[in-house]
Amino acid sequence: MTKLVSLKEAIARHVPDGSAVALGCALEPAIPFAAAHELIRQRKRDLRLIGPISDIAFDMLIGSGCVAEVHAAWVGNVSAGLAHCYRRAMEQGIPRRIIVRDHSNFTMALSLLAGALGAPYIATRTLLRSDIPRANGTFKEATSPWDGSKVLLIPPLVPDVTIIACQRADADGNAHQWGPWGVSQEAALAAKTVIVLADEVVDRAVIASDPNRTICPGIKVAAVVHVPGACHPSPLQGRYARDHEFFHEYHRATREAAGFERWIAEWVTGVPDHAAYLAKLGPRWTALRETGEPAAEARF
Amino acid sequence: MTKLVSLKEAIARHVPDGSAVALGCALEPAIPFAAAHELIRQRKRDLRLIGPISDIAFDMLIGSGCVAEVHAAWVGNVSAGLAHCYRRAMEQGIPRRIIVRDHSNFTMALSLLAGALGAPYIATRTLLRSDIPRANGTFKEATSPWDGSKVLLIPPLVPDVTIIACQRADADGNAHQWGPWGVSQEAALAAKTVIVLADEVVDRAVIASDPNRTICPGIKVAAVVHVPGACHPSPLQGRYARDHEFFHEYHRATREAAGFERWIAEWVTGVPDHAAYLAKLGPRWTALRETGEPAAEARF
Amino acid sequence: MDVSPGELMVAQAAREIADRDVVFVGMRLPLIAFVVAKRTHAPNAIGLFELGVVRDAPAPELLYTMGDTPNVRGAVWCARTVDLMGLLQQGAVDAGFIGGAEMDRHGNLNTTAIGADRAHPTVQLPGSGGGADIASLAKRLIVIMPHDKRRLRDKVDFITSPGDHVSVLITTLGVFRFVDGEAVLASYHPRSSVQVCAEHTGWPLRVAPNVSETASPSSEVRRIIRGYDPDGFWTRRGD
Amino acid sequence: MDVSPGELMVAQAAREIADRDVVFVGMRLPLIAFVVAKRTHAPNAIGLFELGVVRDAPAPELLYTMGDTPNVRGAVWCARTVDLMGLLQQGAVDAGFIGGAEMDRHGNLNTTAIGADRAHPTVQLPGSGGGADIASLAKRLIVIMPHDKRRLRDKVDFITSPGDHVSVLITTLGVFRFVDGEAVLASYHPRSSVQVCAEHTGWPLRVAPNVSETASPSSEVRRIIRGYDPDGFWTRRGD
């Protein structure tokens, strides 16, 4: 049974207002910006975002008023600096107040790992002297029953939906992703359901020829969407490079709320879909394409 | 700096008597039988074996008197039945008494995962009504501070040395393994040090062409050994099939202690090294060779 | 009609797999039951193998272990044990198969050791493998084992796999369902009977009011079984 | 000699990496410090990037983020964040780099928010990333940040990254070592001085008895820095 649908349909059907949505879980690369844009176009509200770094994806969603809560280790613009919408929301409540659950990258990874394992909690020694646990509010301090030392217990995070972008997937949702995984696999396995944005939709036989590349099995996946270039301006290994200047332009353009609104109107709400977004990028998009170097042969 | 040494040297240098040794961690495939044989040839003593299934590898080591303690979920002969040496040791103390720390596959995986994570412990709901926790003796029952439910806390297992077999590795120990990983990666990352048995030793560039295939990074590895066919009679994906009949012959031959001794004299202590073992197998070995089907291309 | 107990058990086990079920398959007879189910009424069932393999189609040739190279070739996911056990602990696995050396009337299984003292067993068995996890965490548990008074015991020496989630016990003589946590004979195999089952059961047999003969495998199912295991390595063992 | 503060900090940071160190690299200046160290005195250092990349050779071109495609191409391991954080928690990581918005004299860093109330900050900063983990778990922590009275504060509003393991603080004006958990000025950069450092530090400056001028980068090091970051994107920012 094919799970292939349009991005519009996938987001409309599987991301109701109020959903806990994990995205951008590979950290800097493979961020499904196309899905973030579609969430903005569909004016989703009260989302609870989950993701370690997210580069500017969370910032856009916050600025567009889609977000009630953020579980993150870092929200900013990796090569340019601070995230202006996140700042406005936290400092001035513009466009609305949001709740932040601070994490470090490790506690984010452990939370999603606990979710993926179905584990009640995982004990760690990170952050014992940090203020993050207090700000997060979901961890618990405890004493190890082995040596009496202080530990921090991390409970599971279970996204309602995890959105991942990958190089290729079959129509069942079996998804091949290569390059760094960050916390993507944990986020996908922990989630109640998964939306896969595939740069390429391939026959099942392509996936089955190399099952070690599968980051997420079809049994977890509700929708597969064919979206070439879904990660721009972030990179996708072997397909296209990061568009650094795009991040820097966004940083300059969104210093003020009005500038952010102009930027969104131009790049997100002003284009009907991701194909139109790529067409608008034009030769700038083409110039980012990479073909990479082939992996050494492996036979199964 | 190359870490390439002979198997004899690797075992002599990195597996002192009394070591906690993890091996056979991919479950049925990729069991480094060549290393088990070398441990027997070098008459290692008081080893503490760690591994979920191990097929007949643990049985041979137990029968040879190398073993003081076993941490395992299952010790037997997967396609033939019970493990005779394990039975003799447990039932009659022949050749010696051993201590068993019972596990399930999940608690074995969680123990090694906790080791790999450097985590003080991981909570689980498996085995709450099983007698295994009592028999294992290292887990602790606890109450979840979130919902008051009963949980089991699994502490880390840290092997002194994990021995893995893989399709290819470079001289630094960066190892590519494909096919099922079982608990191999956790066992390697948890260990104080790792010995890699590579079917093929390749240039670093081969590894770096596909870093997602790396199961274990060189920073964990003390020794890399070039041992073609290291897993016989277990299979290695894309290289050779399982020698089912060999397992069945072993089962029949080792029903009595004297039969086991004859078998070991013929197949292990009676051959100087693994190359001689393969030569002794002759055309039977050649007939197991597989070349597999190529994985679909991935470019980095 | 020449149907071996192994074939009967496989056919019954296959009926326990519903279409779209996510199933922890296990080795030996369950493996063939998965093949039968996939090729008949459950084409969309998904098989999980605890060493880290997920298949939406059975391996094309007979497997001796789940790690055989044909079981990896053509898998849709080659993962880590902990990934699949995680799905199990999440509650995402519908059913799992296990075998046992002994079982009590409440479905508790012993695959660890016979004898009162774990450190000095009378018979050392191989152990749990993933069985105890599947028993603890799968929604329903399907147990396959030989029918024998010394195996179906009033009390087992060691609870490897707790019986809470056992939905069915398929033996060489009949099929038990679990009612209020206790085994009740639901059907007896051809050439067996309630009487025969009672004689070979180590607890006072409870019998379902509507007990009947176990349905024999159809000729299609027999063809699938014999096509997959032509030498009867798993299905005609010990016959 | 035209050396920017960025270049001075990179050169000093590179000196903090010993050969064979396993290092959590991080972005911006530390990335270039890793390149300098690898190409000079620490050819066997290994770089870990928290998104899951392990490299024994730096990427051949300037990186803007650790996830840029050239940083993955030629890596020896492409892993999961949790794998690398696990090595960190095991104690297998020798050193890590982090930056900070503010630091107190005990090395505690704030990268979360300025202001007393976390829910209503005066300035919302991006957050920890992996910084708090590296600070909690690496054997030694190397901190790089601008030297400013408002940044080197007596007390920080929020401890993102605890200071226990800080071994050195490299600023735009000087280098601090930590003695009994407190920052002590070890050297001042060319064109800076003890006096200048004191004026720009928010706590009463402690000065090492053997304080001296920070060694300028050799011409080789300058050549490596400028070859790697020819436009000065990271090393001549804000100059």
Image (spheres, coloured by chain):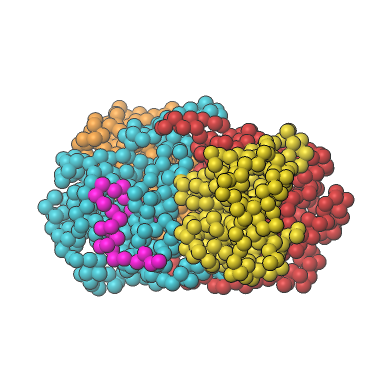
Chain colours: A cyan, B red, C yellow, D orange
Choose between C214 and B243: the one closer to the eye.
C214
Which region is colored magenta?
A1-26
Choose between A208 and D47: the one closer to the eye.
A208
Q: Is residue A13 magenta?
A: yes
Q: Is residue D47 left or right of residue C122?
A: left
Residue B86: x %, y % from top left: 76, 45
* Up/down of C25 relative to D177, above or below: below
User: What residue is shown at x 65% (from left), y 41% (from top)?
Assistant: C205
User: What residue is shown at x 58% (from left), y 40% (from top)?
Assistant: C182
Q: Quadrant of residue B16?
A: top right
Q: Is residue D194 magenta?
A: no
Q: Is residue A169 visible?
A: no
Q: Is residue D75 left or right of residue A90?
A: right
* Up/down of C132 relative to A174, above or below: above
Q: Quadrant of the N terminus of chain B?
A: bottom right
Choose between D29 and C201: the one closer to the eye.
C201
